[in-house]
Image: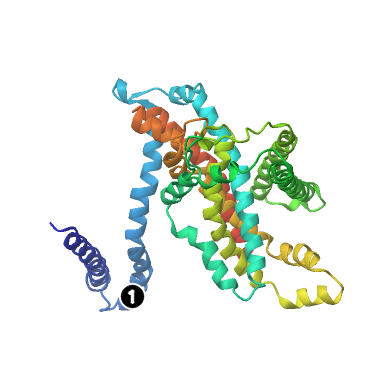
């Protein structure tokens, strides 16, 4: 059958099935189950109105149960059995095997690195873009350009950046933009400025921001009102403080290491094979994509800041930096947290970029890619399912905390 015709028939069956379900279910409810006639007509109408919303919700609830709830329990079961032994129950043996695998710990370490860098820089760049584009005449056009990467699939973005990082032999023209720029450095003043001083300044700013966030979270948890903090919020804040401590430690190490690193000038580099740096280059792809998302949400939040508070601050003599950090930032703090945690959920499930660019080689393994390799290459359903459960356990607290935070904002 022609694919276009097949697609049209599928759409017609799907739409027609939905219309038919709602029409005939209403008819059954009103004419057969609770007919609006006789001495009990009023009671039947009330009962029908109570049942009707659940009747309409049933298809969605059934689909969610079939495609979300069932796979979770099935994955849990697969993580506790061994298919090669006739689905014999082996308890936590698959988890023990996974923990003994060095690749698993490499994936955990890289996921932690992704969690620290990608949400922070995506949110920061999105906030910067939202603030700056609102102050220029062609801001809407600039926002469209920044948001455009969101329309590109992760695999498409990976292919684009793989060309940017491409390497050719020394005597050949470099089609990779990064290597073409890299070969212009020779260790002079420009190299010191661009490869050492500017990265060190960015790392220092990042470390200062992390320390500031960690300090405020710690003060809020240990302050006078901390006893009233809900347990869910306290657990989430404690997790963020621990993450800030790890991020600050890594920032200090990176700041010290940037001045002691010996750059191999004059040679084209195979960027995706250099440990640590290759992971950062992969993260840049996701930062490039998610910055547009952060910008759109934060731009809406900035426009919702009351003009009266800004005008009052200006009258009191506040400069633009004080207006931004002391007036605007506190009022959009909840939105920043929501954007941060939403990007964090995306990072925990990142797979496409790593799979398309390095396939987990050269110490770039992440948990989702590790799960894929165990399930579909090693054909080890037990360990693969155990890795899936680990990802779910890492995602769940952040998701619950995000929902709690959104509900608090709504109240």
Q: In the figure, is residue 383 to the left or right of 219?
A: left
The residue that disc 1 covers is 45
Residue 108 location, quadrant? top right
131 or 80, which lies in front? Answer: 131
Q: Is 356 situated above or below 79? A: below
User: Which percent across, then down, holds residue 410?
Assistant: 61, 65
Q: Does any portion of residue 79 appear in the rendered image?
A: no
User: Element type at marker 1?
Assistant: helix
Residue depicted at 77% across the width and 49% down the height: 212
User: Does residue 43 appear left or right of residue 258 in this picture?
Assistant: left
- Image height check: is 285 above or below 261? below
Crowding at mark 1 (Cα within 10 Å: few <14, some 14-19, many 20+): some
Spot occupied by residue 8 in the image (x, y as percentages of width and height): 20, 64
Residue at 59% x, 47% y: name it. 118
Please identify the quadrant where the C terminus is shown. bottom right
- Could you say which is closer to the camera, residue 371 or residue 145? 145
Most extreme residue toward the front is 171
Q: Locate residue 331, reporting x and y percent.
A: 71, 65
Seen in the picture, residue 285 relative to 140 is either above or below; the reply is above
Name which residue lies at 28% across and 23% down.
86
| Residue 73 percent location from the top left of the image | 39, 39
Please name whichever residue, 345 or 77, is drawn nearer the observer in this view of the structure: 345
Q: Residue at x 56, y 72 (%)?
A: 140
Q: Which corner quadrant holds the N terminus?
A: bottom left
């Amino acid at each position: 059958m022609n694919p276009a015709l097949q697609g049209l028939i599928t759409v017609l069956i799907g739409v027609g099935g939905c219309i038919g379900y709602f029409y005939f279910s209403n008819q059954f409810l009103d004419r057969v189950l609770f007919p609006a006639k006789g001495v009990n007509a009023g009671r039947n109408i009330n009962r029908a109105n109570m049942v009707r919303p659940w009747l309409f919700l049933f298809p969605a609830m059934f689909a969610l149960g079939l495609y979300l709830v069932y796979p979770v329990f099935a994955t849990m079961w697969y993580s506790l059995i061994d298919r090669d032994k006739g689905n014999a129950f082996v308890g936590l043996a698959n988890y023990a095997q996974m923990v003994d695998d060095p690749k698993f710990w490499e994936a955990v370490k890289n996921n932690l690195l992704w969690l620290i860098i990608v949400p922070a820089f995506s949110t920061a760049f999105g906030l910067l873009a939202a603030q700056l584009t609102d102050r220029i005449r062609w801001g809407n056009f600039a926002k469209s350009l920044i948001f455009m990467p969101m329309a590109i699939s992760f695999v498409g973005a990976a292919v684009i950046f793989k060309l940017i990082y491409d390497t050719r032999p020394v005597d050949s023209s470099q089609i990779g933009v990064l290597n073409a720029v890299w070969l212009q450095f020779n260790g002079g003043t420009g190299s010191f400025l661009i490869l050492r001083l500017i990265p060190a300044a960015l790392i220092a700013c990042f470390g200062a921001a992390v320390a500031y966030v960690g300090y405020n979270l710690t003060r809020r948890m240990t302050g006078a009102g901390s006893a009233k903090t809900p347990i869910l919020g306290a657990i989430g804040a404690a997790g963020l403080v621990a993450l800030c401590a790890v991020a600050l430690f890594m920032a200090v190490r990176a700041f010290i290491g940037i001045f002691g690193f010996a750059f191999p000038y004059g040679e084209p580099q195979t960027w995706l094979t250099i440990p640590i740096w290759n992971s950062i280059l992969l993260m840049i792809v996701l930062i490039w994509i998610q910055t547009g998302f952060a910008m759109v949400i934060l731009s809406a939040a900035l426009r919702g800041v009351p003009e009266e508070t800004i005008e009052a601050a200006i009258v009191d003599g506040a400069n633009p930096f004080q207006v931004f950090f002391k007036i605007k930032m506190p009022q959009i703090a909840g939105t920043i947290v929501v954007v941060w945690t939403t990007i964090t959920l995306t990072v925990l499930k990142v797979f496409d970029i790593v799979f398309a660019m390095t396939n987990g080689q050269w110490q770039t393994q992440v948990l989702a890619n590790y799960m894929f390799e165990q399930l579909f290459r090693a054909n080890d359903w037990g360990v693969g399912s155990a890795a899936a459960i680990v990802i779910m356990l890492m995602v769940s607290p952040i998701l619950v905390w995000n929902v709690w935070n959104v509900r608090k904002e709504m109240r």
